[in-house]
């Protein structure tokens, strides 16, 4: 029995919705050109400025917990494009364009429409976090991971330009190792996805003799050696700059102390810490709605893959299927499994650091966002991929009631969950505001940064140095804008106030005081308002008596602002 064909309204609705989201994404991109650097980014950019201008070397001349790849990235950006906000915004947009292009290319194996939606959804999610998320370390590390996904074959077989299939495969494994090695130098925890991508790539490997132990070992060796290349380069540079020992000391002596702190800068231990880790992990960084859209997408994709295979077996249609369809179905299933496992792995990723700050969830947000695009696949109830009804009757698969419901429901779920996650109306209003607003509207820290920078610029003289007593309160950003030179190797004072009784922190305090007195900085910027991330819990303090004594005797308050004060040296 035939059912008259009729045109579905769904494709029109989907294309219209996608066009609207693309317009929103473009508006967000244009509006973001007025954004300013915030949070950790100015600290790292200022460190890169000191590296270029004064020859400072991380770990030797700058006490920081960021990895060498992070400093290399910021140094490269500053060296090529300068240290201004607009240049940084263009770098951010360029990297985002690369990431979205890679996303489209990978996800388009599920269909071009899925690829487009996946890319656009993540772009909107990224911009929805505003300027505080821009080019955070965890986000930068996503780019090599996304590029590594492109190395997963789309189903093609055979040699390339005379090279053997095995050799081409080894090149792919080497690039996977190299890309994850780059992510490792930015944030070591990001390599949790390496075994998954490696396994997915190896599952595609075709060897005439079968997959042998020797073959697996050669693939692992190719990835492992390539993975080590960025690390060897970084270690060689650190050794040549006499920064290797300070780096090892930071990693082995300070990071274990830093890791104990929670995201709210509190020291907890034992059962209390275990409860904290479990409770924070379950919240998924507030991405529950994205997780639901991803789950819906996985259901659609798994049903589509299962239906494709079942349709071939049950109806004997494999002989009449498009050549290569079985390979594409197999590739689709493997790629789908990879997406699910990567989302699960990067859901656990913030637990490794134990901080659960918003940017720690950037990799998870990425995989959940692009997985939501799978909702465009829909599901087909009671039909195989060719429109054969289970009762043997003939229907039009595009207009049957089960098919229509199976296409509309996942699509509406994606739109609903995306709206709830990022508040699409508010995103539109924010983008409109950003496009129309001027530079002061995005002033970091409510204008504090520009205020301090202007004050310093008017008074700094050649040879003057400045010491911030701050962390992310804006003083370092102001020093970057004023091109002020750092007095000691300490960009912030956070490390002086936790685990204060330990020999290592005591040594840090002693080293800081010695350098401070030797440098005799002309200005000291102290941030003390409620927004300062004070530590709390066992063995923490808000007091540094020796430093306070120096400030009382050798300095006086030259300017007091909202939540901060600037001291000027009066002695000597």
Image (cartoon, grey):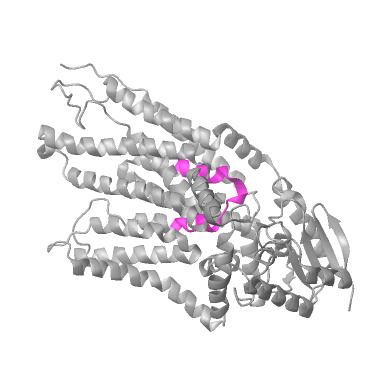
User: Looking at the rendering, in which quadrant would you find the N terminus?
Assistant: top left
Residues 270 and 1: in front is 270
User: From what the image shows, is residue 346 above or below residue 214?
Assistant: above
Position in image of residue 506 (x %, y %): 68, 73
Residue at 20% in and 63% down: 165
Q: Residue furthest front?
A: 271
Q: Quadrant of residue 291?
A: top left
Residues 368 and 441: in front is 368
User: Looking at the rendering, in which quadrant would you find the C terminus?
Assistant: bottom right
Magenta stretch, main secondary structure, is helix
Position in image of residue 253 (x %, y %): 56, 72
Evaluate whether residue 66 shows in this view.
no
176 part of magenta stretch:
no
Q: Quadrant of residue 548?
A: bottom right
User: From what the image shows, is residue 518 above or below residue 542?
Assistant: below
User: From what the image shows, is residue 338 above or below residue 20?
Assistant: below
Position in image of residue 394 (x %, y %): 16, 21
Evaluate whether residue 276 shows in this view.
yes
Residue at 19% in and 67% down: 213
138 part of magenta stretch:
yes
Q: Quadrant of residue 336?
A: top left
Bounds of the magenta span?
120-143
- Count of numbered tags: 0
Position in image of residue 111 (x %, y %): 32, 40
User: From what the image shows, is residue 356 above or below residue 22?
Assistant: below
Residue at 64% in and 49% down: 35
Residue at 76% in and 67% down: 544
In-image side of 247 versus 413 (left or right): right
In-image side of 195 versus 570 (left or right): left
């Amino acid at each position: 029995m035939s059912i008259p064909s009729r045109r579905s309204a769904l494709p029109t609705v989907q294309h219209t919705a996608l066009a609207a989201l693309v317009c929103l994404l473009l508006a967000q991109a244009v509006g973001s050109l007025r954004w300013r650097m915030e949070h950790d980014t100015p600290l790292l950019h200022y460190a890169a400025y000191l590296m270029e201008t004064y020859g400072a070397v991380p770990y030797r001349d700058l006490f920081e917990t960021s990895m060498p790849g992070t400093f290399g990235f910021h140094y490269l950006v500053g060296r090529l494009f300068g240290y201004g906000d607009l240049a940084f915004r263009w770098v951010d947009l360029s990297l985002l364009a690369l990431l979205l292009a890679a996303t489209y290319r990978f996800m388009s194996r599920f269909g071009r429409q899925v690829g487009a939606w996946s890319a656009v959804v993540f772009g909107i999610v990224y911009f929805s976090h505003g300027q505080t998320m821009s080019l955070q370390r965890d986000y930068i590390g996503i780019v090599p991971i996304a590029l590594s996904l492109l190395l997963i074959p789309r189903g093609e077989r055979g040699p390339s330009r005379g090279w053997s299939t095995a050799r081409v495969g080894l090149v792919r494994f080497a690039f996977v190792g190299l890309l994850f090695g780059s992510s490792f130098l930015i944030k070591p925890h990001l390599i949790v996805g390496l075994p998954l991508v490696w396994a997915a790539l190896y599952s595609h490997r075709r060897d005439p003799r079968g997959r042998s132990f020797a073959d697996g070992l050669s693939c692992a060796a190719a990835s492992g050696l390539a993975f080590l290349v960025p690390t060897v380069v970084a270690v060689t540079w650190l050794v040549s700059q006499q920064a290797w020992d300070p780096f090892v000391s930071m990693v082995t002596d300070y990071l274990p102390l830093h890791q104990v702190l929670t995201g709210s800068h509190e020291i907890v231990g034992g059962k209390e810490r275990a409860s904290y880790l479990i409770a924070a992990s379950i919240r998924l960084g507030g991405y529950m709605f994205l997780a639901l859209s991803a789950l819906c997408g996985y259901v659609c994709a798994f049903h589509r893959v299962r239906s494709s295979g079942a349709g071939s077996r049950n109806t004997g249609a494999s002989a009449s299927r498009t050549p290569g369809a079985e390979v594409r179905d197999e590739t689709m299933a493997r790629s789908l499994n990879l997406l699910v496992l990567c989302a699960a792995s990067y859901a656990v990723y913030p637990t490794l650091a134990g901080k659960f700050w918003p940017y720690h969830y950037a990799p998870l947000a990425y995989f959940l966002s692009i997985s939501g695009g799978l909702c465009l696949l829909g599901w087909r109830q009671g039909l195989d991929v060719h429109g054969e009804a289970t009762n043997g009757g003939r229907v039009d698969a595009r207009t049957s009631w089960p098919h229509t419901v199976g296409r509309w429901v996942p699509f509406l779920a994606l739109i609903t969950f995306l709206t709830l996650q990022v508040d699409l109306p508010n995103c539109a209003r924010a983008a409109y505001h950003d496009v129309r607003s001027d530079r002061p509207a995005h002033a970091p820290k409510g204008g504090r940064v520009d205020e301090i920078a202007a004050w310093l610029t008017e008074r700094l003289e050649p040879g003057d140095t400045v010491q911030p007593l701050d962390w992310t309160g804006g003083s370092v950003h102001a020093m970057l804008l004023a091109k002020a030179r750092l007095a000691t190797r300490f960009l912030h004072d956070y490390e002086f106030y936790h685990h204060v009784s330990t020999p290592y922190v005591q040594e840090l305090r002693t080293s800081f005081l010695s350098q401070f007195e030797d440098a005799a900085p002309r200005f000291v910027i102290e941030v003390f308002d409620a927004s300062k991330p004070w530590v709390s819990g066992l063995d923490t303090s808000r007091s540094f008596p020796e430093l306070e004594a120096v400030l009382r005797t050798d300095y006086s308050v030259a300017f007091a602002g909202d939540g901060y004060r600037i001291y000027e040296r009066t002695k000597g």
